[in-house]
Image (spheres, rainbow, N blue to C red):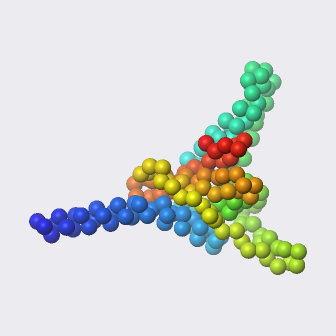
Amino acid sequence: MKKWLSLFLVVIIALAAYVGAGPYLTVRAIRTAVKEQNTAALAKQIDFPALRASLKAQLLDALVREAGADVQANPIGAFALSMATGVINGTVDAMVTPVGLAGVMEGRRLWRNTRDSFNRPQVDANGEPLPVPEPLHDARYRYESLSRFTATIQDDSGKPIVFVLRRNGLQWKLADIRLPMNGNTH
């Protein structure tokens, strides 16, 4: 009986350690995939439907807030907002890819490169390649709950970008990116 109880406790402790280390292992897998420019490995670490839905909601909210009540009440303004909504939805669908996300994780401004490849190396005035930015470099990590973990970095203009990992069972995936909107993060 003692043997089974000890085995049970060891399994529970190992499982808790694995779940606790899960987001760090996911961040490490993301960093490795970005550094190796392995889009397939990066795609395994991301919940694309949840990420796209979150980004669309953030961008649409920012658009509506920026437009204001006067534009929304005007029939032409409402039509323009509905057209802009379609553009935002299409843009997010096209840009939320392993390549686009790699750029954000390196702290670059949002998705400058839309090609289906990683950015070409930047060069200095002498033609020497500049060091490639470290993905999620200097990130601040934090558990928000047992199934939610964040990694916060600064973009190239100093604004915070928060990467949210969510746990589903024993697996952690990137499911949200909180973008800096008007100096705020959601």
Q: How many marks?
A: 0
**Is residue 18 shown to the viewer in this render?**
yes
Residue 63 position by quadrant: top right
Q: Position of residue 90 (x, y in %)?
A: 71, 44
Where's residue 77, x and y in %? 79, 26
Tell me where residue 144 appears, x and y as whole percent. Answer: 48, 49
User: Quick check: 75 above or below 36?
Assistant: above
Q: Looking at the picture, tell me which residue is in the foreground, 128 or 158.
A: 158
The answer to whether residue 114 is seen in the rendering is: no
Residue plotted at (44% across, 49% down): 145
The residue lying toward the viewer, choosing from 54 and 87, is 54
Quadrant containing the C terminus in the rendered view: top right
The quarter holding residue 10 reads: bottom left
Q: Which residue lies furthest to the left in this view?
A: 1
Q: Answer with the quarter of the image where residue 83 lies.
A: top right
In the image, 124: left or right of 118?
right
Viewport quadrant of the N terminus:
bottom left
Residue under the image location 69 percent in, 41 percent down: 59
Using residue 167 as the reference point, say whether residue 122 is left or right of it.
right
Image point 80% across, 70% down: which residue?
122
In this picture, residue 175 sits left or right of residue 2: right
